[in-house]
């Protein structure tokens, strides 16, 4: 039997387009625009899912994106929210978290043993013995899980966009629509966002039996659509609030980060279920859910309903039910004072005319289920003492029904306000937390602001818009719309202070996500978890997928009652993004992974280079020839450098020019060495410390002229060192200029016994050692390209570093390869370079030092000129100098015949029970014929010839012997 | 108008100079410079950008007069520091250009926010870049520069997003 | 994401900036005691309140000072150190 009603102009479905889909193996039809839940409900399918813990059957609760017991999978996606996701042609849907289908879920047995599973049961029962926990964890996770992760999920790049506006209005209900229209009329660029498929909020479903709200909606939408400076986005939710009004809006296609100058939060309120026994049966739903079914989807919630209310709203719902052709056998009103439609509510008067029986001061004591427990079949009703919160069950009676609509009150959808840092206070006139102090630029309007009457909500939207105009200084005249213009809520509260019906047998659910009952809170409090944050974690209330949207307020009320405190003393739990669960694919989006390439990158790639990431750069680590291992490739390249010649692309080196009359002075302050007397055409070592005297970086300073130094800096630290130079210049204000030429210039290091011969054919510069010894720099043409030649000895004593314009480097490289061919020249990579520099005995900052190493420990005493007036770290070194050195970097070799487990970098140097230091660099050198390395040891171990012990990963001790550097002694030229 | 066009113009000629005397030095070479920081002007056919207070980047046609003239002056002068430029340079245009920009840049680059002669140094696709808006033959064109060593990366990202936008365009 | 205003380049998201630590003028290293120097290098005042901080606008390479309240995370003003020093100099 179909529950579909005849056409109504308000509805969101397109009756001309029928959709076919499958649910749990059965065929169903729907109309375009139906959600999965509305389509199934229309077909009288009421068990839509199973609860998370007890596997109880569940149906429609809110139809507002927190029906989290109704999660589906279509085989690809999981945890599809059936209450809001539109059904599509050909969908094959199954409820998640069932064993054998939603109707006969085998895990429903858990519901029957639930008395033995109190809150905290899992925490207590399964942690001993510890070795059994993995077993229990597996069982529990399978029974209590949600959807199954699809590991074959296609990778779809979701876009992350940025957009800007004057005003972002969140929520397109009466307050939001009015606010957006008012602000846009004054000229603001407005984005209005609503998570529903269509704008309107409660105007699209809350009728109370007449057409006023529908007329308001038509008028407001016409106004909003008439203004080009309102961008109305529906079907997307504001997912969180981040500082300075950055709000990500999550839609199906991706995330748009909105940066607004001001924000109006008009997010409304969540209807809250009253708590009574079996309030979770399919057919028991929120009043607003019933209205949504009726007006958005043309579906009758039931044929014969009961309204259980604790406010005036329930009477509106009753009228809407009657309009939908549902008979209402009773209105059960928790409030004793509501006799005969008290409180002057017009709907109540109307209800009385329709001969609906009103039980004021009564409660639903218990909902009754059909024999298969699949849906509600009636309700046990009795009088209720709302002063003492007692159900007077002596005179109970039963009414038949196939549906119960619940209206007991609201909780503000204030997540964004909380995240923005709003201070909330409890307003007893509406029994709700409302904003007390809002952060600058953030405004609230409508139900979330504690305003409930429709005309007042629209007025509040206008008031908020005017507040925004004042805030942005855009109001032509200072508009003096005070909050007081919006009437303070009068009459009966829209929310009941304590809509809970106790029942000795429980199953009166507070949190549907996690199947938490009133007694669970009482037990938690007894165990001592009587603070809201502790109670949340112990009971897991609000920790399910709806994040407490329908349960947190009840939890606060229950705790307040248990502790005998007013609600505002209990406080609320912290609200964090995201407002709704957001797919990981959206969060991941397109990743930006910037990387820098040298002008030789293509050559490297074509010649078998294996790349490694160094800083932002892709560098060739080594070149793999066919059939070679990495180790063989490195040894082959190193052999070429020691016996013929090698070239490496060093273009990623940091390169900085220091110009100006005080350039030498700048260097003297910045580095530990002396540069004032440095001769033009030479280079000197640079060592940079921080203020604590810790080694940061080293490099080379070439003096190109009196007022120009050219600095080479290690690849990894280049950006940070340049940044630090800029900062020092801000403080020192010397007559200098810094030019970062890292990307503009490339560098090639040519090394090996044949280096001089190879280079000689490409330049007119006299390369013979007498005029051009180590430590010197020349500017000349190399292969007709203007270049600097730096005779540095990082990897070899016979080496030339060639610095040329980046785009010309491939030309120089090719010329070197051609000229070096007859000498056996070979390209080598950065891994090989590390071995070669180790053979030379060079310690590298960051590799052979850590965040505490001072230059004395590193053995760089010679580079530190304490007799200068100032350098960074000098004062700290003066203090350090007064104390004995605590550790010392030494060079070591392993026995030539060593065959055991190879020590690794970071393995510890052990003496008896003491850790004396660690290995910082280690590698096998074919040239030396031994494993060589650098390690920190205690000063008593530093003398050449001392042996010390290294503990390998498997725990064995390996003897190492301290030796002199360089490992690789000076070579005769070939 | 095309939906989106992405043109690599890294081949154009560029000249960089900075320092406290750079503005005077350019003036001496009769190059018109922007009066305020982070702005640009046209000097003949060359774009003269003032990056911050005392740095200038000039982009010219290949063999263009402005850059050639400056490059010919190799004399070092106190307070004038030549900053050799190897930039990757792009022109972005079309009706969907803001769609592209909104994914790679967090800033508001719409016409109302980015003034006609503004130069913006910001992050684009995660790296430092310089952006301005230029009117070429009545078409609004966004210009984008980044360090040349990031050029391959930047081009890859632009084309990847461009292809997606193109696909969306075709579908709709 | 928070916004920060570079005195040269204007207001930008925090992702364009690098934090450079608190701005604290060093004691005179020639006259201070070892203890004073060690305190300057190693000790930080962690109590929340108004702090002067170094910030670096990465795309333009601009260092500047931001006066920020570390409790409220509100930035009162930002300026170039050189400008502030010059101002202090002029007012002497």
Image (cartoon, helix red, strand yellow):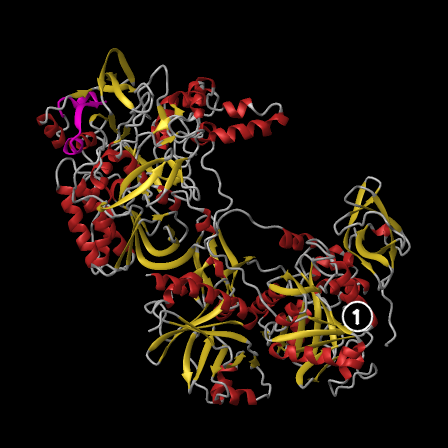
Is residue B92 shown left or right of residue A169? right
| Image height of A838 relative to A422, above or below | below
The x, y position of residue A925, in whole percent, is: 82, 60
Is residue A637 shown left or right of residue A611? right
The x, y position of residue B128, in whole percent, is: 51, 66
At horizontal 13% and vertical 31% (from top left) the residue drawn is A347
Residue C45 vs residue A340, the one in the foreground: A340
Q: Give the residue at mark 1.
A: A641
Residue A597 picture quarter: bottom right
The x, y position of residue A784, in whole percent, is: 67, 86
Residue A920 vs residue A684, the one in the foreground: A920
Residue A24 picture quarter: top left
The x, y position of residue A647, in whole percent, is: 73, 72
Magenta-colored span = A320-341
Describe the element under mark 1 as helix, strand or loop.
helix
Is residue B4 shown left or right of residue A859? left
Question: Does the segment drawn in magenta span residue A324?
Answer: yes
At horizontal 24% and vertical 26% (from top left) the residue drawn is A403
Q: How many callouts does the rendering have?
A: 1
| Image height of A160 relative to A439, above or below | below
Chain designation of label 1: A
């Amino acid at each position: 039997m179909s529950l579909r009603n005849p056409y109504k102009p308000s509805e969101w479905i397109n009756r001309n387009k029928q959709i076919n889909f499958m649910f749990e193996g059965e065929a169903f039809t729907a109309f375009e625009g139906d959600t999965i839940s509305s389509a199934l409900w229309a077909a009288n399918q009421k068990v839509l899912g199973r609860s998370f813990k007890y596997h109880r059957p569940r149906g429609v609760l809110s139809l507002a994106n927190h029906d989290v017991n109704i999660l589906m999978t279509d085989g690809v996606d999981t945890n599809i929210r059936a209450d809001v996701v539109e059904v599509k042609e050909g969908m094959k849907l199954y409820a998640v978290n069932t064993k054998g289908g939603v109707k006969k879920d085998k895990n429903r047995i858990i519901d029957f043993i639930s008395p033995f599973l109190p809150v905290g049961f899992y925490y207590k029962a399964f942690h001993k013995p510890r070795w059994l926990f993995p077993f229990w964890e597996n069982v529990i996770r399978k029974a209590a899980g949600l959807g199954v992760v699809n590991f074959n999920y296609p990778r779809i790049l979701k876009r992350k966009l940025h957009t800007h506006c004057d005003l972002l209005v969140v929520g397109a209900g009466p307050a939001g629509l009015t606010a957006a229209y008012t602000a846009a009329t004054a000229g603001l660029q407005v984005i209005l966002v609503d998570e529903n498929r269509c704008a309107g909020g409660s105007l699209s479903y809350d009728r109370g039996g007449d057409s006023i709200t529908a007329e308001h909606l038509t008028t407001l939408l016409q106004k909003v659509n008439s203004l080009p400076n309102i961008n109305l986005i529906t079907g997307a939710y504001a997912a969180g609030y981040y500082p300075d009004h950055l709000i990500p809006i999550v839609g199906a296609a991706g995330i748009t980060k909105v940066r607004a100058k001001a924000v109006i939060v008009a997010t409304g309120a969540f209807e809250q279920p009253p708590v009574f026994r079996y309030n979770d049966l399919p057919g028991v739903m929120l009043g607003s859910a019933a209205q949504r079914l009726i007006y958005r989807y043309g579906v009758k919630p039931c044929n014969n309903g009961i309204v259980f209310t604790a406010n005036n709203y329930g009477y509106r719902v009753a009228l809407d039910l009657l309009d939908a052709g549902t008979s209402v056998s009773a209105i059960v009103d928790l409030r004793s004072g509501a006799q005969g439609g008290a409180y002057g509510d017009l709907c109540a008067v109307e209800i009385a005319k329709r001969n609906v029986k009103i039980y004021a001061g009564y409660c639903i004591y218990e909902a009754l289920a059909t024999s298969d427990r699949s849906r509600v079949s009636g309700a046990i009703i009795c009088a209720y003492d709302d002063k003492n919160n007692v159900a007077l069950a002596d005179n109970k009676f039963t009414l038949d029904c196939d549906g119960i609509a619940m209206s007991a009150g609201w909780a503000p959808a204030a997540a964004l306000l909380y995240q923005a840092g709003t201070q909330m206070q409890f307003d007893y006139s509406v029994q709700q937390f409302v904003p007390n102090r809002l952060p600058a630029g953030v405004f609230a309007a409508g139900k979330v602001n504690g305003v409930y009457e429709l005309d007042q909500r629209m007025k509040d939207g206008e008031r908020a818009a005017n507040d925004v105009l004042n805030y942005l200084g855009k109001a032509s005249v200072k508009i003096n719309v005070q909050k007081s213009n919006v009437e303070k809520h009068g009459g009966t509260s829209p929310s009941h202070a304590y809509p809970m019906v106790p029942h000795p047998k429980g199953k009166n659910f507070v949190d549907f996500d996690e199947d938490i009952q009133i007694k669970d809170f009482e037990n938690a409090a007894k165990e001592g978890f009587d603070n809201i944050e502790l109670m949340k974690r112990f009971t897991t209330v609000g920790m399910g997928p709806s994040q407490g949207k329908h349960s947190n307020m009840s939890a606060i009320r229950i705790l307040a009652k248990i502790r005998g405190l007013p609600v505002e003393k209990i406080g609320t739990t912290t609200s964090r993004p995201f407002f709704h669960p957001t797919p990981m694919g959206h969060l991941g989006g397109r990743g930006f992974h910037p990387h820098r390439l040298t002008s030789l990158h293509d050559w490297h790639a074509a010649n078998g280079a294996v790349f490694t990431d160094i800083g932002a750069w892709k560098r060739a680590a080594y070149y793999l020839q066919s059939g070679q291992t990495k180790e063989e490739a490195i040894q082959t390249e190193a052999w070429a450098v020691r016996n013929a010649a090698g070239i490496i692309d060093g273009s990623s080196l940091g390169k900085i020019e220091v110009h100006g009359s005080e350039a030498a002075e700048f260097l003297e302050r910045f580095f530990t060495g002396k540069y004032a007397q440095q001769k033009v055409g030479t280079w000197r070592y640079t060592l940079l410390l921080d203020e604590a005297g810790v080694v940061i970086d080293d490099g080379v300073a070439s003096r190109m002229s009196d007022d120009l130094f050219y600095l080479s800096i290690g690849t990894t630290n280049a950006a940070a060192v340049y940044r630090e130079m800029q900062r020092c210049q801000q403080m020192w204000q010397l007559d200098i200029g810094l030019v970062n030429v890292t990307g503009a210039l490339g560098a090639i290091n040519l090394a090996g016994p044949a280096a001089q011969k190879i280079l000689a054919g490409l330049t007119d510069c006299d390369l013979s050692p007498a005029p051009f010894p180590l430590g010197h720099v020349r500017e000349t043409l190399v292969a007709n390209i203007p270049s600097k030649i730096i005779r540095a000895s990082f990897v070899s004593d016979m080496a030339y570093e060639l610095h040329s314009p980046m785009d010309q480097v491939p030309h120089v490289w090719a010329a070197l390869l051609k000229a070096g061919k007859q000498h056996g020249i070979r390209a080598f990579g950065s891994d090989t370079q590390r071995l070669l520099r180790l053979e030379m005995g060079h310690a590298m900052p960051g590799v052979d030092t850590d965040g505490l190493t001072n230059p004395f420990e590193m053995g760089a005493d010679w580079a530190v000129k304490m007799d200068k007036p100032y350098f960074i770290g000098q004062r700290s070194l003066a203090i350090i100098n007064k104390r004995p050195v605590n550790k010392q970097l030494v060079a070591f070799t392993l026995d030539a015949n060593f065959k055991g487990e190879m020590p690794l970098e970071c393995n510890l140097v052990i003496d008896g029970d003491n850790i004396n230091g660690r290995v910082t660099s280690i590698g096998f050198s074919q040239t030396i014929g031994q494993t060589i390395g650098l390690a920190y040891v205690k000063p008593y171990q530093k003398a050449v010839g001392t042996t010390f012990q290294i503990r390998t990963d498997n725990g064995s001790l390996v003897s190492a012997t301290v030796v002199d550097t360089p490992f690789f002694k000076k070579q005769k030229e070939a | 108008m095309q939906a989106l066009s992405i043109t690599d113009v890294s081949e154009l000629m560029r000249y960089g100079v900075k320092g406290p005397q750079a503005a005077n030095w350019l003036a001496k070479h009769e190059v018109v410079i922007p009066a305020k920081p982070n702005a640009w002007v046209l000097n003949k056919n060359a774009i003269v950008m003032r990056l911050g207070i005392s740095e200038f980047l000039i982009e010219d046609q290949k063999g263009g007069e402005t850059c050639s003239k400056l490059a010919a002056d190799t004399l070092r002068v106190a307070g004038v520091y030549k900053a050799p430029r190897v930039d990757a340079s792009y022109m972005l245009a079309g009706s969907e250009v803001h769609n592209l920009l909104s994914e790679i840049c967090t800033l508001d680059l719409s016409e109302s926010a980015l003034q006609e002669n503004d130069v913006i140094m910001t992050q684009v696709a995660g790296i430092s870049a310089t952006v301005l808006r230029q009117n070429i033959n009545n078409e609004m064109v966004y210009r984008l520069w980044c360090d040349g060593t990031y050029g391959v990366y930047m081009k890859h990202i632009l084309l990847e997003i461009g292809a997606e936008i193109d696909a969306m365009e075709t579908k709709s | 994401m928070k916004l920060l205003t570079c005195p040269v380049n204007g207001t930008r998201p925090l992702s364009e900036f690098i934090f450079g630590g608190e701005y604290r003028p060093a004691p005179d290293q020639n006259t201070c005691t070892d203890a004073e120097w060690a305190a300057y290098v190693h000790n930080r005042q962690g109590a929340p309140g108004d702090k002067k901080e170094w910030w670096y606008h990465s795309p333009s390479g601009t260092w500047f000072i931001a006066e920020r309240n570390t409790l409220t995370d509100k930035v009162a003003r930002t300026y170039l150190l050189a400008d502030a020093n010059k101002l202090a100099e002029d007012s002497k």
